[in-house]
């Protein structure tokens, strides 16, 4: 079972709001691998340990975690490291395991494998551009950050940037202005925070910063982010 927690009105703590039973007796063998939050909409995917026979579920709340719905997901048996619902199409969801990027067009009932990776996927973000989907992934080895473009015929992951990121990556996020400036931010396990613009060199537009070595990180942008006039964004890290 999964228990959702929501912050109280006074902002002083968290209160258990809803419990969703999604597998077996108390969710035996269950791994909630990834969570995505956008306003009051929370999307999560939970996968049981391979071999337990329970399968997996996509969970969704549209009221900040107070109530939940779930849908059985077919074909995903590996722990999920990231889930990103489409911001423009309600039934489109992307997820990533350490080895594969998947896409669903039926709200998570089924997922199709898009592309594989031998570099160990750790992070994912997705946006629409020119009427198609663009995804970026962070990895533990290799170039560190790669992109996938729906229009490419071979569904390859392509190293992003004229220089490599240079570290294992724990978080990656496309700027809300990606459609015009192609900006994104990545956070390395070594603590390096770097901005890339239009596929150029990492840290060329704005110098890299550091949040210290970490095992997990997240990135958020304010609504008025602009890579030229207001390149402010927020990073949280742990570990």
Image: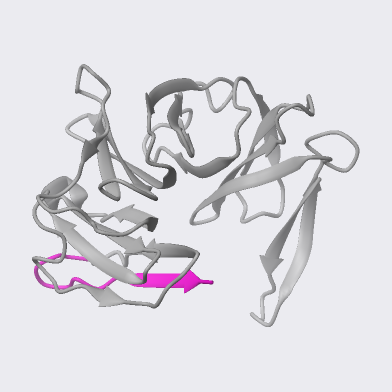
Residue 128 seen by the camera: no
Numbered-mark total: 0
In the displayed structure image, the side of residue 144 where residue 198 appears, left or right: left
| In the rendered image, the vertical position of residue 165 relative to residue 51, given as above or below | below
Q: What residue is rendered at 31% in x and 77% in y?
A: 210
Dominant secondary structure of the residues highlighted in magenta in the image? loop
* Residue that extends furthest to the right in the rendered view of this protein: 25
Judging depth in this view, the residue of 88 and 50 nearest the camera is 50
- Image-quadrant location for residue 59: top right
Judging depth in this view, the residue of 2 and 81 nearest the camera is 81
Q: Magenta segment, which residues?
A: 225-239
Q: What residue is rendered at 68% in x and 30% in y?
A: 56
* Model colouring: one colour
- Image-quadrant location for residue 64: bottom right
Q: What residue is rendered at 37% in x and 41% in y?
A: 119
In the displayed structure image, the side of residue 189 where residue 36 appears, left or right: right
In the displayed structure image, the side of residue 36 where residue 212 appears, left or right: left
Measuring from the top left, give residue 187's x and y in whole percent: 34, 63
Measuring from the top left, give residue 161's x and y in whole percent: 14, 49
Measuring from the top left, give residue 206's x and y in whole percent: 13, 71
- Image-quadrant location for residue 158: top left
Judging depth in this view, the residue of 194 and 6 nearest the camera is 194
Measuring from the top left, give residue 114's x and y in whole percent: 38, 23
Magenta segment includes 232? yes
Residue 197 seen by the camera: yes
């Amino acid at each position: 079972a999964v228990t959702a927690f929501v912050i109280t009105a006074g902002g002083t703590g968290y209160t258990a709001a809803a419990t969703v039973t999604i597998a077996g007796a108390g969710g035996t063998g269950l791994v909630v691998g990834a969570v995505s939050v956008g306003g009051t909409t929370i999307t999560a995917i939970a996968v049981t340990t391979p071999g337990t026979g329970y399968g997996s579920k996509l969970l969704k709340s549209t009221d900040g975690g107070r109530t939940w719905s779930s849908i059985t997901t077919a074909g995903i048996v590996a722990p999920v490291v990231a889930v990103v619902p489409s911001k423009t199409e309600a039934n489109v969801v992307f997820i990533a395991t350490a080895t594969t990027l998947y896409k669903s067009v039926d709200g998570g009932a089924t997922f199709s494998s898009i592309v594989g990776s031998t570099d160990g996927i750790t992070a994912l973000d997705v946006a629409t551009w020119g009427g198609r989907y663009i995804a970026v992934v962070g990895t533990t080895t290799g170039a560190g950050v790669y992109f996938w473009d729906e229009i490419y015929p071979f569904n390859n992951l392509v190293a992003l940037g004229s220089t490599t990121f240079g570290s294992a990556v724990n978080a990656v996020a496309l700027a809300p202005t990606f459609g015009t400036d192609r900006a994104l931010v990545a956070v390395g396990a070594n603590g390096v925070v770097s901005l890339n613009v239009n596929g150029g060199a990492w840290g060329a537009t704005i110098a890299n910063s550091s949040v210290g070595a970490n095992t997990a990180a997240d990135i958020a942008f304010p609504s008025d982010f602009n890579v030229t006039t207001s390149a402010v964004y927020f990073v949280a890290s742990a570990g």
